[in-house]
Image: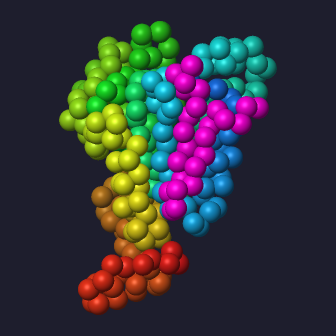
Amino acid sequence: MTEDILNYEAIGPVARLTLNRPRAMNALNLATLEQLERRLADIAANDEIRVLVLAGNGPAFCAGADLKEVLAGASLAPGEADFLDRANVIFSQLRNLPKPVIAALNGVTMAGGLELAMCADIVVAAESATIADAHANFGVYPGAGGAAILPRLIPLNMAMYLLMTGKSLSAAEMKACGLVCEVHADDRLVDATLELARHIAKKSPIALRRMKQVARASADKSAADALLHEQVMLRQHMRTADFHEGLTAFAEKRAPNFPGR
């Protein structure tokens, strides 16, 4: 397995994973998924890492799945895990990572690449980035969140537009839809994303983890049940050192230094 198809960097409290198959537009293959799975497990277990940035090298963030490996699944025996099975397990692992995840879209983001970006908690993009579902262009059906998750993140009519037309939209257009949170000049994307990640990394990791857990679960709950979930998490959080550090720092008019416990 080639070790540089997924680059890993630790920049203080920020981990950056960069898809590194630029000649293949960072298309996802099994080798990339295996490395991503291993890195995500390491990041989840490392208390020194508080934020993950997911990026791409070259002209694309990710152009989707490596279709050769998707097609190879047709020859597998019944019940044998194929590429899409593996992708969905790892995408779920990414969605549920107990730390904030930022996707930085540097260029072409389509199909499985869009589905990968949708696993992040925050999406930022370069001005020149283009974003598309694109499955309809190839007679392919989305299998990792395109039809199931996209309408939960942007207005239904815009999700249907992307799904049915296969067209690419600009980063600015996707910001107007609500999928992209920040748009930066191409030469500022890396630094701006790191600045955002460092800003978030200063917050209580326990509070952020619990906010993420409640927010992601709320879509499948009534408002009353979601509020109850939030209250339970608050009571647990009030017993942490981070909670007391935050209030003490506020009273002492200083920046908090959260220990993460």
Quadrant of the rendered structure where residue 44 is? bottom right
Q: State whether residue 119 appears in this view.
A: no
On screen, residue 98 versus residue 70, left or right, reads: left
Q: Residue furthest front?
A: 187
Write down the region rendered in magenta.
1-26
* Looking at the image, residue 6 lies above or below residue 214: above
Q: Position of residue 188 (x, y in %)?
A: 33, 41
Q: State whether residue 75 appears in this view.
A: yes
Q: Position of residue 142 (x, y in %)?
A: 48, 23
Q: Residue furthest left?
A: 176
Query: Which of the two residues, 144 or 65, is positioned nearer the viewer here?
Result: 65
Q: Position of residue 59 (x, y in %)?
A: 45, 24
* Looking at the image, residue 79 lies above or below residue 6: above
On screen, residue 117 versus residue 71, left or right, reads: left
Q: How many marks?
A: 0
As for residue 93 lying within the magenta part, the answer is no
Q: Residue at x 56, y 34 (%)?
A: 19
Q: Residue furthest right?
A: 77
Q: Position of residue 30 (x, y in %)?
A: 68, 29
As for residue 6 lying within the magenta part, the answer is yes
On screen, residue 15 versus residue 196, left or right, reads: right
Q: Residue at x 46, y 30 (%)?
A: 61
Quadrant of the rendered structure where residue 163 is? top left
Viewport quadrant of the N terminus: top right
Query: Which of the two residues, 191 or 235, is positioned nearer the viewer here?
Result: 191
Q: Residue at x 57, y 19 (%)?
A: 24
